Image: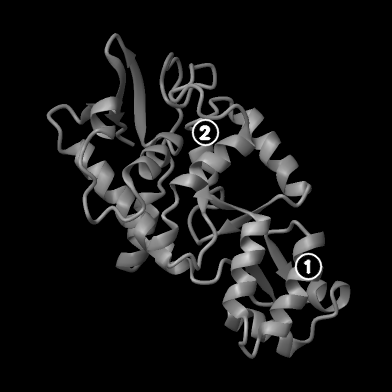
């Protein structure tokens, strides 16, 4: 396994669920850590999207968040999963795989995706293929990936048009004869995400007891290397259960979770 794959594997290593955590981060019954921010999954997505630094990418990317970040705002995971599936089935959101663990997805509002992809392909040789994809596939099929058979038989794409979609970054190879739906230019986002998560976990790990008050962490100066912003990554490490959340009389304590 090369160094890059090791980094991705370690960064997204699943934390085993613990039992009897009480007020821990992964307890569905625990009270909200950010009360009043969001009442449902859609509201949580809107809030998280507002944290996305559009200017960092010259507004070329749609706001991207990870599914697990929603868990930091809505504690009942079953409810979150159900509501996100409803949004996906209605075509309001799209889910994307980025080569991480099988259950790690980013989430993008469909209209944001359509607008950014259309703008990015304007005037390019693959613009017609992209427009056809957005008008036919994106509006009718909520799948995360597409087979060659589906693309050709159900949506009447030719080999050349599929190649153009890959060149446009709208599709990326999954395996022989199938492709993941993709966000053009998302590689930069993934790079900043991995680096920011590593930086934040390093900050907590270096404290005396590998723990820090949430309020103290939120008040810290954001390292220049954390391009996506401190709040964005706080919701990441909480939702991914990379830290345990302990309720104290002084507020919520984030404790580095050894795996």
Asked if disc 2 and disc 1 are in contact, CB closer than 8 Å, the reply is no
Q: Is residue 158 left or right of residue 119?
A: right
Is residue 209 placed above or below 167 in the rendered structure? above
Between discs 2 and 1, the one toward the N terminus: 2
The picture quadrant where one finds residue 215 is: top left
Number of labelled discs? 2
Quadrant occupied by the C terminus: top left
Is residue 76 placed above or below 87 in the rendered structure? above
How many angstroms separate mark 2 from mark 1 (CA)?
Answer: 29 Å
Q: Is residue 204 left or right of residue 129?
A: left
Marker disc for residue 137: 1
- Give the residue at mark 2: 71
Evaluate whether residue 169 shows in this view: no
Q: Residue at x 28, y 52 (%)?
A: 226
Indicate the position of residue 180 as horizontal and vertical percent values. Answer: 63, 67
Quadrant occupied by the N terminus: bottom left
Indicate the position of residue 93 as horizontal and vertical percent values. Answer: 67, 51
Indicate the position of residue 61 as horizontal and vertical percent values. Answer: 51, 64
Q: Residue at x 70, y 35 (%)?
A: 82
**Alpha-carbon neighbours of circle 2 within 10 Å: few (<14), some, or many (≥20)?**
many
Q: Is residue 65 left or right of residue 178?
A: left
Marker disc for residue 74: none
The picture quadrant where one finds residue 166 is: bottom right
SS type, badge 2 = loop
Is residue 225 placed above or below 229 in the rendered structure? below
SS type, badge 1 = helix
Which of the colour schemes (rainbow, by chain, secondary structure, one colour) is used? Answer: one colour
């Amino acid at each position: 396994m090369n160094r890059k794959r090791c980094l991705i594997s370690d960064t997204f290593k699943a934390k085993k669920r613990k039992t009897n955590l009480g007020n821990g981060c992964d307890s569905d019954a625990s009270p909200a850590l950010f009360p009043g921010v969001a009442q449902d999954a859609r509201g949580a997505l809107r809030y998280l999207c507002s944290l996305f630094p559009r200017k960092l990418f010259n507004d070329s990317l749609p706001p991207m968040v990870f599914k697990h970040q929603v868990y930091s705002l809505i504690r009942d995971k079953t409810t979150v999963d159900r509501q996100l599936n409803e949004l996906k089935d209605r075509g309001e959101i799209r889910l994307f795989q980025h080569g991480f663990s099988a259950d790690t997805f980013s989430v993008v509002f469909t209209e944001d995706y359509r607008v950014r992809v259309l703008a990015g392909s304007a005037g390019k040789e693959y613009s017609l293929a992209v427009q056809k994809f957005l008008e036919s596939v994106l509006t009718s099929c909520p799948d995360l990936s597409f087979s060659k058979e589906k693309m050709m038989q159900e949506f009447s794409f030719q080999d050349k048009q599929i190649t153009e979609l890959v060149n446009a970054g709208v599709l990326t190879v999954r395996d022989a004869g199938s492709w993941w739906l993709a966000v053009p230019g998302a590689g930069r986002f993934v790079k900043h995400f991995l680096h920011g998560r590593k930086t934040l976990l390093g900050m907590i790990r270096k404290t005396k007891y590998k723990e820090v008050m949430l309020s103290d962490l939120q008040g810290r100066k954001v390292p220049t290397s954390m391009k996506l912003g401190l709040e964005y990554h706080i919701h990441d490490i909480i939702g991914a259960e990379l830290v345990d959340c302990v309720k104290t009389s002084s507020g919520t304590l984030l404790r580095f979770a050894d795996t």
